[in-house]
Amino acid sequence: MFELIYGILNKIFLPITQFSPHISLLLLALIITLFTTLLNRLVTNRKLVKELNEKIKKIKDELKEAEKEKNREKVSKIWKEFADASQEQMKQLFKGFIVSLAVIALFLPWISYKYGGTTISIMPLSFFFGNLSWIWWYVLVALTVSIIFQKLFGI
């Protein structure tokens, strides 16, 4: 099964894997991160998440007031409302997490198969960190690109 998947991925990404490992991994991280960011945007209802964030902020303000008044019934009611809003928010965000996890679970074993044991030596980074294993290079690139894509797509 893995051989079939690896064979397909090898053929799809052949042009990219022809570069040196640090460039290939950079491009793979860029493509995979872009793909997961776009999928996240599709499966997550951003409007609802934004509304829930605003609702949670208001609930927190109400909770502070109720605690100042020492009104236990009101505090209890507000805590339930807070828990419900937080739970709905987590449901929305969890969808994106699951999609990202599925994509990474598909690609990471193949990348490990392709680049396992590879170390990356890029001058400014090697001065501080020495040679990086392929996974650390991939994570460094993916995190950086993810932040950029999230800013670009308003996530």
Image: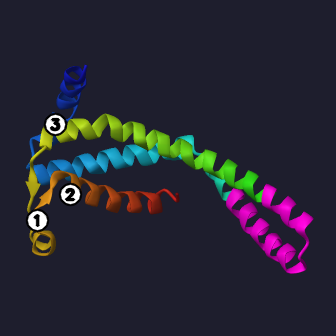
Q: What residue is pinned by disc 3?
A: 113
Residue range corresponding to the magenta coloring: 51-80
Q: Residues within 10 Å of mark 3 (few under 14, many from 20)?
A: few
User: Which badge, 3 or 1, comes first in the chain's sequence?
Assistant: 3
Q: Nearer the viewer, residue 130 or 18?
A: 130
Q: Residue at x 72, y 63 (%)?
A: 56
Task: Please state which amino acid type lies under the numbered disc 3.
Answer: Tyr
Q: Counting other residues with Cα less than 10 Å from the Cα at mark 2, is it few (<14), some (14-19), or many (20 or more)?
A: many
Residue 145, above or below 62: above
The kind of residue tagged 2 is Trp
Q: Is residue 112 magenta?
A: no
> Horizontal placement of 85 versus 138: left or right?
right
Q: Residue at x 55, y 40 (%)?
A: 43
Secondary structure at badge 2 equals helix
Q: For the residues labelled 1 and 2, say whether their Cβ atoms are less than 8 Å apart.
A: yes
Circle 1: element type: loop
The answer to which of marks 2 and 3 sits earlier in the sequence is: 3
- Number of marks drawn: 3
Query: Which part of the image, by quadrant, shows the N terminus?
Result: top left
- Give, as a three-letter code, the residue at label 1: Ile
Query: Considering only vertical position in the picture, is 78 above or below 28?
Result: below
Compared across the picture, whether 83 is left or right of 23 comes to: right
**Is residue 47 in view?**
no
Task: Say which element carries label 3.
Answer: helix
Name the disc covering residue 122, or none: 1
Position of 124 compared to 77: left or right?
left
Instruction: Look at mark 2 in the image and give the residue it sits on.
Output: 137
